[in-house]
Image: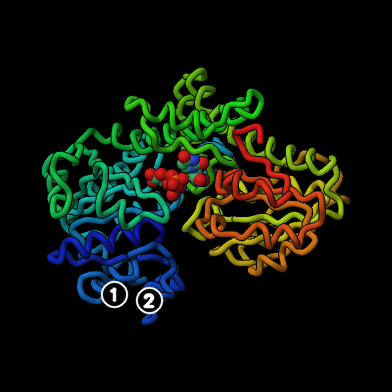
Amino acid sequence: AGYVGGPTMAVLADKCPFLNIYVVDLNQEKIKQWNSKDTSELPIFEPGLEQIIKRVRGKNLFFSINVDKYISIADMVFLSVNTPTKTKGVGSGQASDLRWIEACARQVAKSAKGHTIVVEKSTIPVKTAETIKIILKSTEDSDDSNLKSFSILSNPEFLAEGTAINDLENPDRILIGGEDEESMNHLSKIYEQWVAPTKIIKTNLWSSELSKLIANAFLAQRVSSINSISALCEKTGADVNQVSSAIGADSRIGSKFLMAGPGFGGSCFKKDILNLVYLCNYFGLPEVANYWKNVITINDWQQKRLSEIIVEKLFGNLTDKKIVILGFSFKAKTNDTRESPSIYISRYLLEEGAHLIINDPKVNQKQVDNDLKDDQFFVPTLNNKNSFGTWEFSNNLEAAFEKADAAVILTDWPEYKKINWKILFKKMRKPAWLFDTRSIVEEKVIKDIGINLWKLGSNC
Ligand code: UDX
């Protein structure tokens, strides 16, 4: 009942009224939220999701904690659990932790009846289907009555947060990997209710599993490529947005995913690339592993480099300085902060002793506190913990800018495009700085106000 399972099954139920869909989860609280009468309390916010839930919940879409019961009556079971990066043991920091996938496979093996098609939806390392298959087949063989049998398919999800419903309703492609043609056709027929058959790509299991990782790796690579060029633009006087438009006009390159910024965040990109790096090393391909590892190296460097620029512009000293952070989610239109560049940049600035006022239209104070306190992935640059700064959360921009020395735009929220800088600038301590890492502020608007503007990827 998470970010993939919930929205995907809601759209499936909406498009296929002849199917009964049961979303099951061990997390009681989550199921309660999915079932709550007030649909504004759903555990996930995605534009369009609430309307779909109102249409199909209780009709052919049900949410329950009764996992075994619904596995036993299912013809098809989708596994949509999380596969985070391992934090200890073999492959720590790179390999995916498959404990939940394995637990799911064991539960399906135990409770399924008759023939069941098991579909991997989670992003998982190549050859995970093999593990699932071994677990499922072991019960097939040991079941005396021999009434159980399984087919395994891979059907990765390509939805992006904030556009999940649109991505599901109008996918670029549907990928179905498997060995058993009949099962693949069953799944294909479901998608054919609303997706053109030409968009449904059928491959073997391993190609399907790998394609998901590689799609994310290529997307992240584009972001790192343009971010590396943003630094070169700042040195040479070129403008990264002009370079993006110029190269994106080449239809072989394409214009999407070429926006320079503070680096990619989100739950998938870093995790999937680390996983790819692990796989390449495991299969004895260190050159390939290093190539992809650099996509992450550039991403980390971009965040460090931005933080250093802020420190340098503020006379190399942030102690007792007030900095407004505009945006804490990893991109606009989501409250998700996982791997958000704002976390890393805030931590760098805190380490220099800054006082941060953090603003975000969707993220709340509790989340900010959790992210900044949790030092599991803390990347220290100095060892001087004594100079560690402080932070507070504010919804009130005018109050936040009172005597602030600088503001840093880190998330591309449309709200920030509408800011009246003239009013806010008056409240700031002079000389005041505005650091725009998302190309939100127009130079001509800010020109006569007197605020010092630094724009990522230009020599402004
Ligand atoms: C991504 C993939 O797009 C999706 O297909 C996959 O299933 C999950 O991972 P998501 O994490 O929701 O989706 O975010 P996405 O919109 O792809 O953005 C990822 C990050 O890259 C964000 O931090 C965004 O700000 C950044 N980005 C994206 C850029 O910095 N520049 C760009 O041009 C595009």
- Can residue 98 be seen by looking at this rendering? no
Ligand 1 resides in the quarter of the picture at: top left
On the image, the x and y values in percent for residue 428 come to 77, 58
Q: Is residue 143 left or right of residue 92?
A: left
Q: Counting residues from the N terminus, which is met first, the one under dot 1 or under dot 2?
A: 2
**Horizontally, is 107 left or right of 247 in the view?**
left
Identity of the residue drawn at 30% across and 55% down: 166
What is the distance, in whole Å, between disc 1 and disc 2 at their CAs? 7 Å
Residue drawn at 22 percent across, 64 percent down: 13
Location of the N terminus by quadrant is bottom left
Q: Which residue matches tag 2?
A: 39
The reply to whether the residue tagged 1 has its Cβ within 8 angstroms of ligand 1 is no
In the foreground, 327 or 17: 327
Determine whether, in the image, residue 324 is placed left or right of residue 184.
right
394 vs 442, nearest the viewer: 442
Up/down of 364 relative to 119, above or below: below
Q: Residue at x 44, y 23 (%)?
A: 283
Q: Identify the residue position indicated by label 1 in the image.
A: 54
Residue at (28% x, 71% y) in the render: 62
* Element at label 1: helix
